[in-house]
Amino acid sequence: MPFAQIYLIEGRSEEKKRAVVEKVTQALHEAVDAPRESIRVMIVEVPSANWGIAGETAKALGR
């Protein structure tokens, strides 16, 4: 059973997250020939204050 864990800065719409789940599922289905029913995708949303980019938080960078 393939399992994909995706980390995103919080704030995306449910529609965008559904699209990520669908596209990652499709990619795994095609890449490893796994049945779609066996694929699991988890989205972990991280506050921008807890996400670092080049020594700064994403929040400090306006993201």
Image (cartoon, helix red, strand yellow):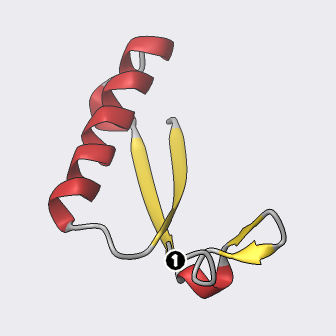
Against 40, is 52 above or below? below
- Residues 27 and 11: in front is 11
Q: Is residue 40 left or right of residue 36?
A: right
Residue corresponding to mark 1: 62
Q: Position of residue 30 (x, y in %)?
A: 38, 13
Residue at (62% x, 87% y) in the render: 49
Figure quadrant of residue 43 = bottom left
- Residues 56 and 14: in front is 56
Against 45, is 6 above or below? above
Identity of the residue furthest to the left in this view: 15
For disc 1, the neighbor class at 10 Å (few under 14, some 14 to 19, many from 20) is few
Residue at (31% x, 26% y) in the render: 26
Q: Position of residue 23 (x, y in %)?
A: 30, 33
Against 20, is 61 above or below? below
Q: Position of residue 13 (x, y in %)?
A: 21, 67
Against 24, is 27 above or below? above
Identity of the residue furthest to the front in this view: 61
Does dot 1 land on a helix, a strand or a loop?
A: loop
Residue type at mark 1 is Gly
Residue at (39% x, 23% y) in the render: 27
- Residues 61 and 41: in front is 61
Q: Is residue 59 left or right of residue 56?
A: left
Residue at (23% x, 55% y) in the render: 16
Q: Position of residue 15 (x, y in %)?
A: 15, 58
Number of numbered tags placed on the structure image: 1
